[in-house]
């Protein structure tokens, strides 16, 4: 597809945020929408390299509310968009092994229940009873929500892109952004590897690369790219079909079923910010040892695949929505590792902001860029 000379809006970043925003803007009747992706295929950046987890279990009301709006959109995705995204509601089971986390879990469950989310608080014994394949002698408490689960990231992105294209959106891959023209404090155009598009509106959904895109427009964004990596195993017949998405919270270690085997990941607390998406083999061994300690069965598994991706981390682990001091330069980024699950509602919210000047479905106005300089941070505890 040829790059058009003009656009009513240019969306930078063809992952779940950009694809959802393009779809929802087109659904509202907006014309001349251009969605740009620097890779060959849409959804192969941060979205395509995530673990696919979706959950209601967060520690702040706004993140829980984002899940309450977004996850039902994933449940009815095939009905609305026509694409099967394989939403498996296996449940998330978060495990606390120290008193600080156990106290936070209790508070979080009370808050989630108050908002109508039926998360259950488990004792250490209940955790051990639910996970007979795992060694959790030190478990103090746990939380479980049966509607949490796993969704296919590629299915979500391609579903939105295909539906958006049918409504006239021009979705262009292999179109790296090289610059943003700003004049008189307003966006005037976007330069790409394929040429320039004149536009008065840009939506930055570039995920871990959003800070670089912001700099092109003269806007500083407090977003740090951090590598996260994971691996999958060959089939393990001992793992039951109803095995939940398990998170050893203190170690940021997680397990979930992937096909007939497991997907296992762990956050490297010593990871330095950067754009490296190569697997750190040394840390993979650390991850493997921690996994075997928790689930001895893993010792007899072989690795099927491994990869690394990037989180886009903000100082309070919450996203950034809305406008900037540059007129026409808008943001939907900074999701700090839980963007995939909130992508559907976030694209809809940005369509409301862009077309109506306000958020109607859910008020996320407190998650603006100015909160960082004004000290209005909202800290998320449940980040893995």
Image: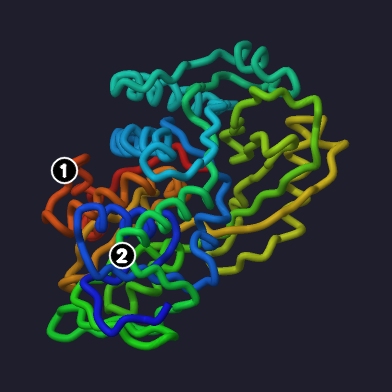
Residue 259 tag number: none
Pointer 1 residue: 360
Which residue does the image show at 54% across and 71% down from the upper left? 40
x and y, in percent, of residue 334 in the image: 38, 56
Which residue does the image show at 15% across and 80% down from the upper left? 185
Which residue does the image show at 61% across and 17% down from the upper left? 127
Front: mark 2 or 1: 2
For mark 1, does the 10 Å Cα neighbourhood hold few (<14), some (14 to 19), or many (20 or more) residues?
A: few
Give the CA separation, mark 2 to mark 1: 25 Å
Q: Is residue 219 left or right of residue 105?
A: left
What sort of colour scheme is used for the picture? rainbow
Q: Is residue 316 left or right of residue 147?
A: left
Quadrant of the rendered image containing residue 187: bottom left
For mark 2, does the 10 Å Cα neighbourhood hold few (<14), some (14 to 19), or many (20 or more) residues?
A: some
Is residue 322 shown above or below 41?
above
SS class, disc 2? loop
x and y, in percent, of residue 181 in the image: 26, 85
Quadrant of the rendered image containing residue 88: top right
Is residue 322 shown above or below 149?
below
Viewport quadrant of the N terminus:
bottom left
x and y, in percent, of residue 75 in the image: 42, 33
The answer to which of marks 2 and 1 sits earlier in the sequence is 2
From this viewpoint, is residue 191 visible? yes
Residue 168 tag number: 2
- Of all residues shown, which one is farthest toward the right? 300
| Residue closer to the observer: 124 or 183 | 183
Q: Are marks 2 and 1 in contact (CB under 8 Å)?
A: no
Which residue does the image show at 22% across and 45% down from the upper left? 364
| Residue closer to the observer: 31 or 365 | 31
Quadrant of the rendered image containing residue 288: top right
| Residue closer to the observer: 32 or 278 | 32
SS class, disc 1? loop
């Amino acid at each position: 597809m040829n790059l058009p000379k003009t656009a009513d809006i240019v969306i930078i970043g063809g992952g779940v945020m950009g694809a959802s925003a393009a779809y929802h803007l087109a659904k509202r009747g907006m014309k001349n929408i251009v969605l740009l992706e620097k890779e060959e295929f849409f959804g192969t950046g941060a979205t395509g390299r995530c673990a696919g987890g979706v959950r209601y279990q967060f520690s702040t009301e706004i993140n829980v509310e984002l899940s309450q709006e977004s996850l039902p959109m994933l449940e009815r995705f095939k009905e609305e968009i026509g694409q099967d995204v394989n939403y498996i509601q296996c449940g998330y089971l978060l495990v606390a092994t120290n008193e600080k986390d156990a106290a936070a879990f209790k508070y979080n469950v009370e808050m989630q229940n108050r908002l109508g989310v039926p998360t259950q608080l488990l004792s250490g014994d209940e955790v051990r009873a639910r996970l007979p394949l795992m060694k959790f002698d030190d478990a103090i408490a746990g939380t479980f929500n049966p509607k949490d689960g796993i969704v296919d990231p590629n299915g979500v992105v391609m579903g939105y892109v295909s539906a958006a294209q049918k409504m006239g959106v021009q979705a262009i891959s292999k179109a790296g952004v090289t610059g943003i023209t700003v004049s008189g404090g307003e966006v005037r155009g976007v330069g790409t590897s394929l040429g320039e598009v004149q536009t008065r509106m840009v939506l930055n959904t570039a995920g871990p690369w959003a800070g670089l895109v912001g700099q092109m427009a003269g806007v500083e964004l407090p977003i740090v790219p951090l590598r996260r990596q994971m691996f999958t195993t060959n089939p393990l017949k001992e793992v039951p079909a109803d095995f939940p998405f398990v998170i050893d919270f203190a170690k940021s270690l997680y397990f979930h079923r992937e096909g007939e085997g497991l997907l296992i990941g762990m956050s490297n607390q010593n990871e330095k910010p950067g754009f490296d998406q190569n697997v750190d083999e040394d840390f993979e061994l650390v991850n493997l040892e921690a996994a075997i300690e928790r689930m001895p069965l893993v010792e007899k598994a072989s690795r099927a695949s491994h990869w690394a991706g990037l989180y886009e981390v903000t100082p309070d682990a919450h996203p950034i929505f809305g406008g900037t001091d540059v007129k026409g330069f808008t943001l939907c980024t900074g999701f700090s590792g839980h963007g995939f699950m909130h992508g559907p509602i976030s694209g809809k919210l940005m369509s409301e902001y862009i077309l109506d000047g306000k958020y109607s479905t859910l008020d996320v106005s407190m998650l603006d860029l100015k909160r960082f300089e004004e000290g209005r941070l909202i800290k998320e505890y449940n980040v893995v």
